[in-house]
Amino acid sequence: MSAEFWAIIGVGTIIFFTLLKTNDHLAETNRRLQTFWEHLLDQRR
């Protein structure tokens, strides 16, 4: 089993699981990122 083989398997698995995720999960992640950035920006003021 070559390194290229495992790289393809890894990327394929990540893409597969990403496609399985629901929009709710994406929205949740988005909201957390937004909260994180707002918190970071507030600290710099």
Image (cartoon, rainbow, N blue to C red):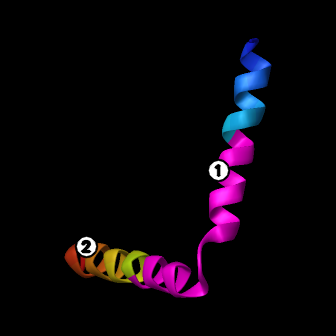
Give the residues in magenta.
11-31
Mark 2 burial class by Cα count in 10 Å: few <14, some 14-19, many 20+: few
Mark 1 to mark 2 CA distance (whole Å): 35 Å
**Which picture quadrant has residue 21?**
bottom right
The three-letter code of the residue at mark 2 reads: Arg
Determine the main secondary structure of the stretch shown in magenta.
Answer: helix
Q: Position of residue 22 (x, y in %)?
A: 59, 81
Local secondary structure at mark 2: helix
**Which picture quadrant has residue 37?**
bottom left
Mark 1 burial class by Cα count in 10 Å: few <14, some 14-19, many 20+: few
Q: Is residue 19 magenta?
A: yes
Q: At 74% across and 45% down in the image, what residue appears? A: 12
Which quarter of the figure is the N terminus placed in? top right
Q: Residue 39's mark?
A: none
Q: At 70% across and 57% down in the image, what residue appears? A: 16
Which residue is denoted by mark 1 in the rendering? 14
Q: Is residue 8 above or below residue 16?
A: above
Indicate which label's residue lies in the foreground, 1 or 2. Answer: 1
Q: Is residue 12 left or right of residue 22?
A: right
Q: At 60% across and 85% down in the image, what residue appears? A: 23
Local secondary structure at mark 1: helix
Q: Is residue 18 above or below residue 6?
A: below
Q: Are marks 1 and 2 in contact (CB under 8 Å)?
A: no
Q: Residue 44's mark?
A: 2
Q: Is residue 20 left or right of residue 1?
A: left
Give the mark nearer the N terminus: 1 vs 2. 1
Which quarter of the figure is the C terminus placed in? bottom left
